[in-house]
Image: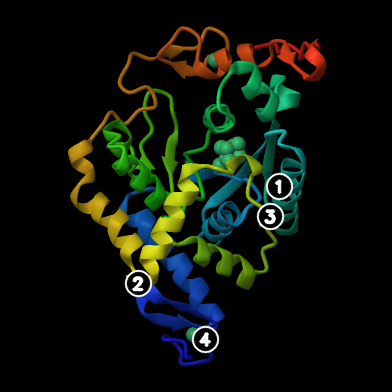
Amino acid sequence: MKCQVCRGPAVIDVRRHNANFCPEHFMRLCRDQTQKSIDQFAMLEPGDRVLVAVSGGKDSLAVWDILTELGFAADGFYIGLGIGEYSDASRGYAQRFADERGLTLHVDDLLRDHGFDVPNGSRAAKRAPCSACGLSKRHLFDDAARRGGYDAIVTGHNLDDEAAVLMGNTLHWQVDYLGRQMPHLPAANGFPKKVKPLVRLTERDTAAYCLLRGIDYLVDECPMAAGNKHLSYKAALNDIEVDSPGAKHAFYFGFLDRAAERFAAPTTDTDGAPVTPCERCQAPSSNGVCAFCRLTERATQAVPIEMGRTRRRAKVAS
Ligand code: Q46
Ligand code: ZN
Ligand code: ZN
């Protein structure tokens, strides 16, 4: 197996490109594909300061590394979600990555800073854990980007993620969500720009990139993802990909090229509703009190625990 660029020994085959690569040229491919996404969707300008949403997993560390290699001033932002050992371990990977490279990692912690964690807070608020978690992450990333004056929030969503979301949205004809599947959500109404530069790379690519770059990442998935429908959509797409290499790419990029604009939706996080500062935290909101402050209020109420006892979680100043 020879590298298609230099004819040296190849270490990885990329079937959707019908090509094999040596370590150096595979890593270059990953950087080139990332730059191509940035250019194609006008995600970032040279000199932009970006805030990378870091979980300690392969995708977020790979995108942080690649953007730094491409010359962007990229800081990381990690949120402690309070999901047991998973959260403890994930923070360690994120912090070590930053320390070893002299990069800046900002750290927020739901329990310390906002009075609840995902497992208990979501139960108290009667929301699914991933719903409470997603809302919290969106709010805190937006807030951190505004406070830090960053030009964009970067996430490590890859082709597998986006194709699985597209499959779910298509299966259920979620036309509002289909209108928001572009990998670049422009800044609007006080919400920062959000971009997904890894949409041309698969999970296998980012795992291989981390391995070849010597990036140590948390392999375990969040335990709360178990049963998540997106995992079954990913598995289904992987099955299709085995017989039809490139099908995932064609599905997602075909949608972006030829169908996404038919579902065009408001490009803000408030779906076009008038925006005013949240009465409690000043974040832009289409309600008097933003969704995160409402969640915080409910998530920090008395939480039922075993034996019928209750405890009151610390109230948070807002
Ligand atoms: S971290 Fe949070 Fe994910 Fe865990 S609780 Fe769900 S949304 S699965 S990306
Ligand atoms: Zn090569
Ligand atoms: Zn608020």
Q: Callout 1, which amino acid? A: Ser
Determine which residue is flagged by label 4. Answer: 10
Where does residue 167 sit, x and y in percent of width and height? 34, 48
Where does residue 315 sit, x and y in percent of width and height? 73, 11
Q: Callout 2, which amino acid? A: Asp
Where does residue 279 sit, x and y in percent of width and height? 52, 7
**Do the residues bearing badges 3 and 1 touch, measured as CB atoms within 8 Å?**
yes
Determine which residue is flagged by label 3. Answer: 218
Q: Callout 3, which amino acid? A: Leu
The kind of secondary structure element at disc 3 is loop
In whole angstroms, how far apart are the C-alphas of marks 3 and 1? 6 Å
Q: Which mark is residue 243?
A: 2
In whole angstroms, how far apart are the C-alphas of marks 4 and 3? 26 Å
Determine which residue is flagged by label 1. Answer: 90
Does 64 appear above or below 122? below
Q: Is residue 47 visible?
A: no
Mark 1 or 2, closer to the camera: 2
Within 10 angstroms of label 2, few (less than 14), some, or many (20 or more) residues?
few
Ligand 2 lies under 8 Å from the Cβ of mark 2: no
Q: With 159 as the anchor, is 311 left or right in this view?
A: right
Residue found 38% across the figure and 33% down from its top: 187
The kind of secondary structure element at disc 4 is loop
